[in-house]
Image (tube, grey):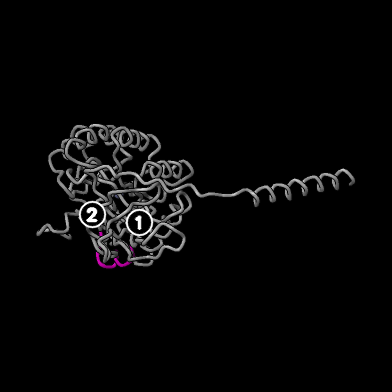
Amino acid sequence: MKRYTSSIIKLTVFIVAAVIVYVCTPHTREPVKITDVPAGKGFSVVEDKIPLYDGLGDDAKVVRYLAFGEKIFPKMQSELFYQLKLGKDEEGKPIFGYVKKRGILIYNPKKKHVALTFDDGPGQATTPIVLEALKKYNCRATFFVVGRMLDNRGMNLLRREVAQGCEIGNHSYSHPLFTDLKKRDVNKQLDRTDRLIYNAIGTTPKICRAPYGGFNKMVLNAMKRPNIYWSVDTLDWKTKSSKKTFKAVKKNVKDGAIVLMHDIHMPTAKAAGSICRFLKKDFETVTVTELASIQGRKLIGGRNYAYIEKENTKNAKYK
Ligand SMILES: [Zn+2]
């Protein structure tokens, strides 16, 4: 007992001393380092409402909120913020705004953009091969996962997908044709998979894809989120051929395309590298949400999207 008491006293003395030293030490804040933003890059808002502040201090006020898909043109940056020129004051001095870098996507405006999507996984033997290819060529993709694949190992793959900047979409729990189900059962399929995904990565998907591409009004209502269809069908599940899968992408890909593949088939997994390498020349390969942001289009819940063209494209098509 005595030993304990003396330990507690020693510890208390130490803590008190530490607090005194801390309080008496003058604390100067590191000045915020401002550097140039490299030229030639595009900056697009990928979150819903991002506050634009009038300063960097604790008392900074929100000037306005940036919208999804909005483009910004920062010239200067700190570690955490971009500085935007908002105009001039009465004396002709520039007025600056500041926005957090989180939620701003850097992209190459000179390139075309495409979303590769992989359905029905994760697959233990195949998805890692796709992930390696994406990493090698600095590409991101969207994985429309099926809940029944999400055992512990599946969840680990999901975390790897997210760690590489990929997006996760909900593709049902057991892959039924939604149009054959009652709305209640469609909801069950989506909820169960949402929960599993949440358990693995801490967020629920913002997008869904109906199994077999089968949807109607009821299905879209149940999703409450955008249904992501495709504009390039590689038929990889049918041909089971790396060569044909690659050729289907090469032949049909264009700006705003959404490419359908399945990361549970080995020929598809093996084609991923050559597809990424081919696309690299003219395209940036991004997630569905990033594609929408770059194209300046907010995806709306309960609607179907087969591809995502630029906002000002006349014949932008919703299927
Ligand atoms: Zn599927």
Residue 55: x %, y % from top left = 38, 59
Binning the other alpha carbons within 10 Å of mark 2 as few (below 14), some (14 to 19) or many (20 upward) gives: many
Which of marks 1 and 2 precedes in the sequence? 1
Res. 266 image quadrant: top left
The mark closer to the camera, 2 or 1, is 1
Image point 38% across, 48% down: which residue? Answer: 78
Circle 2: residue type: Tyr
- Compared across the picture, whether 243 is left or right of 126 comes to left
Image point 17% across, 44% down: which residue? Answer: 110
- Compared across the picture, whether 252 is left or right of 175 comes to left
Secondary structure under the numbered disc 2 in the rendered image: loop
**Direction right: furthest residue:** 2
Residue stretch in magenta: 213-223
Residue that label 2 marks: 229
Circle 1: residue type: Val
> Front-most of 81 and 200?
81
Image point 28% across, 34% down: which residue? Answer: 137
> Front-most of 19 and 168?
19
Residue 234: x %, y % from top left = 20, 42
Residue 164: x %, y % from top left = 37, 41
Q: Quadrant of the C terminus?
A: bottom left
Label 2 vs label 1: CA separation? 33 Å
Residue that label 1 marks: 99
Secondary structure under the numbered disc 1 in the rendered image: strand
